[in-house]
Amino acid sequence: MTQTSWRAPACLISFLIASPGAIADSPCYKGYRDTSPVERAKMTAVLQTVKDALPAPPAGWQISSDDAISVPQSLCQDFGLIPIDYGFGRLYRQVGDAEKRQKLIDDQSARLVEAYKQKQPRLEAIQGKMEKLNAQQIALLQKGDLAGAEKFGPQIAALQEEYQRVADEGNDPAAMNAVSKELNRDLELTISVRVNPTTASVPTGAKPMVAPAGAKSAHRWHVEDENQSTDHALYYFGTWFKRPDGTFQPSVRQGAPFSAAHGMTLEISGDPARVTQTISALNFAKVASALK
């Protein structure tokens, strides 16, 4: 394996395994210092270069996230001898097919309402029996006849079970999941960039791809479950070294300030076809230029 770093995805909007969260949760023994105007300007310039390389929303899509660049205003001096970790993320959302998705919701709601109507007479009958038994039980309790009241317990419990069985009739979790999955299909796409992540790795099962211009390596993997069908494409820029724990860390570029980009990861996540489309539209050479 080369010095290129790999990482596993953390969750839907934090795509790059990096240590900022761990660092934020750990004690800071040397205290914090404000980042300087020069450092902030450099970090902003790096992220602006990356931002300018990202594709515009395709037809029927819009940028749904706050697209403003934000850089660290302070940093823990315990980590003052490594490059500053910062990043940028963008969320795209499809809005052109909102009516189609709403129809899926409406149709599913109509099916549920109709199914309930079919069961409603039986449910009401069972409910009526329970109410009568409850009333008799309460009357005995008010008279202090605890033993008599307890005798109604098994009958009431049996009716409750019967009520639940009827209520569950016709429920199809697989069908519900299929509707949910269809609602989420090709709904959102995210691009996440992490500059100088302290650690990074690649998920098991990821397959290498041909790296585009300026990138050191590229990997792609698919996540399929009851809620989503998502591809992830992950790119690494810069030089990386292996840490004792098996993860990787960007190598420091000699002569470059710690606020500059020493190593960078970029991840695209979304519908497989949409990810492929985004890869074609993204200016990887411009992203790579942020490390200069």
Image (cartoon, rainbow, N blue to C red):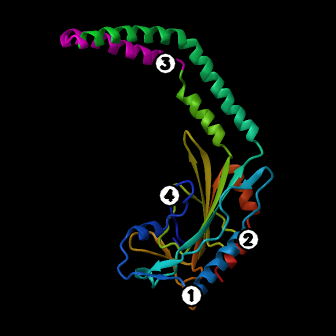
Number of other residues with Cα within 10 Å of mark 3, as a class: few under 14, some 14 to 19, many 20 or more:
some
Tag 2 secondary structure: helix
- The residue tagged 2 is 52
Is 200 in front, or is 258?
Answer: 258
The picture places residue 251, in percent across and down from the top left corner, at: 52, 81
Between disc 3 and disc 1, the foreground one is 3
Name the amino acid type tagged 4: Ala
Where is 168 relative to 188, above or below?
Answer: above
Residue at mark 1 to residue at mark 4: CA–CA distance: 28 Å
The tag earlier along the polypeptide, 2 or 1, is 2
Is 30 in front, or is 244?
Answer: 30
Give yes or no for residue 264 being in the magenta stretch: no
Tag 3 secondary structure: helix
Tag 1 secondary structure: loop
Number of other residues with Cα within 10 Å of mark 1, as a class: few under 14, some 14 to 19, many 20 or more:
some
State the image quarter where residue 233 is shown.
bottom right
Name the amino acid type tagged 2: Asp
The picture places residue 187, in percent across and down from the top left corner, at: 68, 47
Between disc 4 and disc 3, the foreground one is 3
Residue at mark 3 to residue at mark 2: CA–CA distance: 54 Å
Name the amino acid type tagged 1: Pro
Start-end of magenta stretch: 142-170
- The residue tagged 4 is 10
- The residue tagged 1 is 257
Between disc 2 and disc 4, the foreground one is 2
Residue at mark 2 to residue at mark 1: CA–CA distance: 22 Å
